[in-house]
Amino acid sequence: MPSTSDDGRDSVLAERREDAVNAFLRATPALYRRDIGIHPHAAAWAAQTDNTATSLFLTGPIGVGKTHTAWQSARNWVAAHITRTSRRPRVETWRSTALFDALRHDNPDWNVRTLTRQLQEADLLYIDDLAAARVSPTGWTQERLYEIFDERYINRRPCLVTCDVLPGATGDIVGDRVQSRLREMFRGGVLLLEGADRRAGAAA
């Protein structure tokens, strides 16, 4: 029979997990706050808590639910990585167009070096709709992207990306060097979501 102290520790853990998930929910766009069932591969990825955790690349046609799946997966990931003693994991969430803009060397709103370091060191980096940035970033931005992905790769810090194309077909978006790193990072972690465009049926 569990001791009273065990019950207390479990209660602390449950409270910490609830607080962390609620904080993440507040930072989630309203459209994606509703809990949904997700693909078993995405659920298994979110549940990983060891140091060999892979990254997850969600791909598929427009409108199949990649972004909603990603937000739910990230929320599940946060819940799985809460312990009684560790700090709350830090998650960076970016839409690709906003990220590429922020990493421009002439952007007055960001200290690019500081932002690059933050993205390198976050416990989870989520980039949504990578292919939305149809115009290839400048050489400077590509270098920052490479620094971010390379640092995360060598330190086994997971990334979560949604994109309409596979990692090996992103050269026109992020440049060849970043594409090569993406192919390595997401080897074994690509999930193809299929189905009809849910937006066409007014069910985003």
Image (cartoon, rainbow, N blue to C red):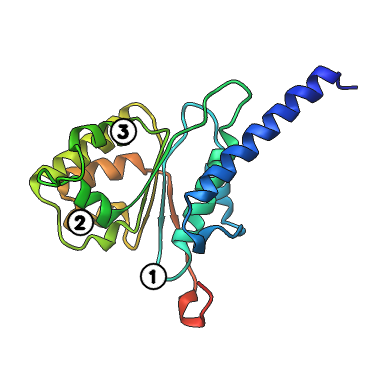
Which residue has dot 3 on it?
118
Q: Which of marks 1 and 3 is nearer the N terminus?
A: 1
Q: Which of marks 1 and 2 is nearer the N terminus?
A: 1
Counting from the top left corner in percent of width and height, residue 17 is at 63, 36
Q: In this view, does 80 lie above or below 2?
A: below
Tell me the distance, in whole angstroms, between the alpha carbons under discs 2 and 3.
Answer: 22 Å
Which residue has dot 1 on it?
62
Callout 3: 10 Å neighbours few (<14), some, many (20+)? some
Nearer to me, 162 or 5: 5
Which residue has dot 2 on it?
173
Callout 1: 10 Å neighbours few (<14), some, many (20+)? some
Q: Is residue 46 above or below residue 100?
A: above
**Residue drawn at 51 percent across, 57 percent down:** 69
Question: Which kind of residue does numbered mark 1 sit on?
Answer: Ile
Find numbered disc 1 in the image and state the secondary structure of the residue it sits on: loop
Nearer to me, 92 or 74: 92
Find numbered disc 2 in the image and state the secondary structure of the residue it sits on: helix
Q: Which image quadrant for residue 97?
A: bottom left
